[in-house]
Image (cartoon, helix red, strand yellow):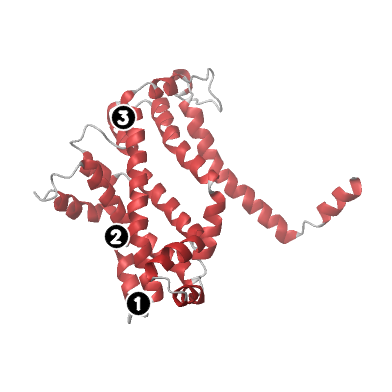
Amino acid sequence: MKNLFTKNVRSINGTNFLWLVSLVSVLLIIIIPLIVLFKFSISDNSSLFPPVPLWPHNPDFSQYKELLGSKDFIMAAFYSLEIALLTVLLSLITGAPVAYVLSRLKIPGISIIIFFILAIRFFPGICSVIPVVEFFSNPIFNLLPVLIKVVLAHTLLSLPYVIFMCQGVFDAIPVELEEQALILKARRFYTFIHVVIPIARTGIAAAAIYVFLLSWNEFIFSYFLMFQSTTVTLPVYLFKKIVWTPQLNYLAAISVCLSVPVILFTFIIQKQIIMGATEGSSK
């Protein structure tokens, strides 16, 4: 056992040591803010003011009990989840076929087309929110439910990324597989659904994860489209609490509840993220 330990220690050269230090540093940068956020969420009032202790004097979970018993918070959580899932569905249904067409058809100036698609996201969201809100204020679209308006706005934000990521995945799939299906008299749509999509599922999953996170955390469009609505998303709910209830432990508890579903969702499908990102990067 001692010889094995000595051998493993000797195998750690300078380069590996630097990689190890970098890995630990990145993990600390990610984990420490989460620990601090959780610490403040369970802090009692005496632990919120200087000198702030490293850990609360009397940990208090009453903020979570109050949140989970709040009808407004539960409704905001389900509303955010509904909007995020609908955004994922709409973004993939519209973005994946566009990406497939851009990947397979030899269109002149394809790079310029992709550039203009991505150019939608070159500008900050605050620049786009005014024309989008004005567009939905039109009498034709004003009758749409607020939920649909927010889903359409989030889809506008996510489509460029979905198209770009899915195109990279489709480029990595050999065209010969589709040609074999076409030789067997399969239609193009059937080939796309039953041949291309199953192979590209990991890359599409990565795009779906990104869209979910974007919609779940989006604030600007949700705020301006929901400012007269009684039901809001979690980011807007948190903003309203910041305005009316500047209590640090309560706000930290809301932030933890807002972060936990994203963290769990990412851990559950982290394998799909890695595999999908690898396929997309082969563009």
Residue placed most toward the observer, 138 or 202:
202
| Residue 21: x %, y % from top left | 66, 51
Q: Residue at x 46, y 18 (%)?
A: 46
Label number found at residue 241:
3
- Given this view, does label 2 or label 1 mark the residue nearer the observer? 1
> Which residue type does callout 2 highlight?
Phe
In terms of sequence position, does the residue under pointer 3 or pointer 2 come before the other?
A: 2
| Residue 93: x %, y % from top left | 35, 57
**Residues at marks 3 and 2, CA–CA distance in whole angstroms:** 29 Å
Residue placed most toward the observer, 192 or 227:
192
Disc 3 vs disc 2: Cβ atoms closer than 8 Å?
no
Q: Residue at x 54, y 44 (%)?
A: 268
Above/below status of 46 relative to 218: above
- Judged from the image, the secondary structure of the residue bearing numbered disc 1 is helix
- Of the 4 image quadrants, the one containing the N terminus is top right
Q: Residue at x 55, y 49 (%)?
A: 270
Q: Residue at x 42, y 26 (%)?
A: 249
